[in-house]
Amino acid sequence: MKLSFRRFDLALTHSWAIATDLSAGKVGGKDIYPVVFVELQDADGRCGIGEGSPSSQYHENWETVFRFLRQVDPDRLSFDDVAGGMEYLASLPGTSMPALCAVNLALLDGAAKAAGRPLHGFLGLDFPAEGRISSFTIGLDTPEMIERKVHEASRYPVLKMKLGSPADRENLAALRRAAPGKTVRVDANAAWKSKEEALERIEWLASDGAIEFVEQPMPASTPLSDLVWLRERSPLPLVGDESYQGAADVDFCSQAYHGVNVKLVKTGGVSAGKAALEAARSKGLKTMLGCMIESSVLISAAAHLASLTDWLDLDGNVLITNDPYRGVANVDGRLGFGSGGSRPGIGVVAAGA
Ligand SMILES: [Mg+2]
């Protein structure tokens, strides 16, 4: 097996900021977002592609991903034994979830292509012919810019709004000037520091009338008793994101939240992402699939798991201007693989192909 990897800088349409950036004292947002593409090719010429999108939120960057990948012996990987390959990666010193994610995607892409099946079929799942709606995210910004971004996003039926800045009230008012009554999901990215502050904010959000749920109101380190207190009183469903790294967190999150947000770069790929969604559903939690800033490789890979979710937030590839691949289409917020269904594997091709 031959393993190659490269850094690629995704260029953002709008500078990107969330509450974690503000609390870290950073000024302004990011304009580029480096990701790592991984390619595997075996002696029979079969190949697979994967992607890892490292986030500073989880102390990862393209260099931590490279460091992990450099120690991988590609001869220990095979498209015929994805689980065995993941066991080998787990045995290596140190870990990097975006790196595991990238290799897992490449292994599954090659394996599903070899089987001549789209990834969801290879995994025993369906993808609805009519597609599935994903939200479109509005990052933190000035009220003027938020109003402009929401106008630009008028074709998307569901928005996700980042909160957790001192201007939250002005920002929601700006969004409502541009999109009165539109369904909005809110993500506080752990910004509210006490249960009382969180409850006060959530009650204010509930008075809007068209907020669907609130994601990660408080830090992942918040004591369970505080989260249980908040869940009992919250007038809106609460969804854990930073609190839900994978299936191992399911007992905690089933007490603290109404739902969880799974991301492939948190779980380390599609295999563990599927397990995280299934574990959450078995505990009665609502499920959501989210993303980082990502190309069509990661977004398409995640879309194959859509049938295991209640909500999709797979918009990372429509927040950028230089996606080097195309796969699942996003038509006015509806994700789909077209009338012919997905190509085999993850179903991506080079953007110019
Ligand atoms: Mg989130």
Image: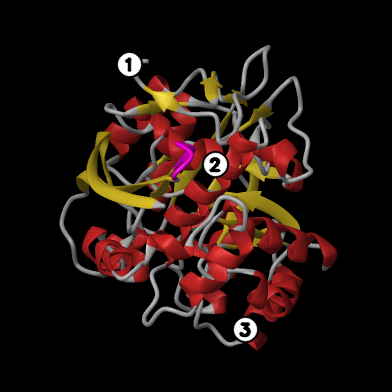
Q: Which residue is drawn at the image coordinates 42% and 61% (left, top)?
A: 75
Q: Position of residue 331 (x, y in %)?
A: 54, 17
Judged left or right of residue 121, residue 194 is: left
Regarding mark 2 in the picture, which secondary structure is present there?
helix
Regarding mark 1 in the picture, which secondary structure is present there?
loop
Answer with the quarter of the image where residue 144 lies: top left
- The mark closer to the camera, 1 or 3, is 1
Q: Position of residue 210 (x, y in %)?
A: 65, 38
Tell whether label 1 touches label 2 (CB within 8 Å): no
Query: Is the CB–ligand 1 distance for label 2 below 8 Å?
Result: no
Q: What residue sits right under mark 3 in the picture? A: 226
Regarding mark 3 in the picture, which secondary structure is present there?
helix
Disc 1 to disc 3, C-alpha distance: 51 Å
Q: What residue sits right under mark 2 in the picture? A: 109
Q: Which residues are magenta?
A: 43-48
- Amino acid type indicated by mark 1: Gly
| Looking at the image, residue 38 lies above or below residue 256 | above
Disc 3 to disc 2, C-alpha distance: 42 Å
- Amino acid type indicated by mark 2: Asp
Judged left or right of residue 8, residue 251 is: right
Q: Earlier in the sequence, mark 3 or mark 2?
A: 2
User: In which quadrant of the rendered image does the C terminus lie?
Assistant: top left
| Looking at the image, residue 103 lies above or below residue 295 | below
Disc 2 to disc 1, C-alpha distance: 20 Å
For residue 352, the mark is 1
Q: Is residue 200 visible?
A: no
213 or 265: nearer the eye? 265
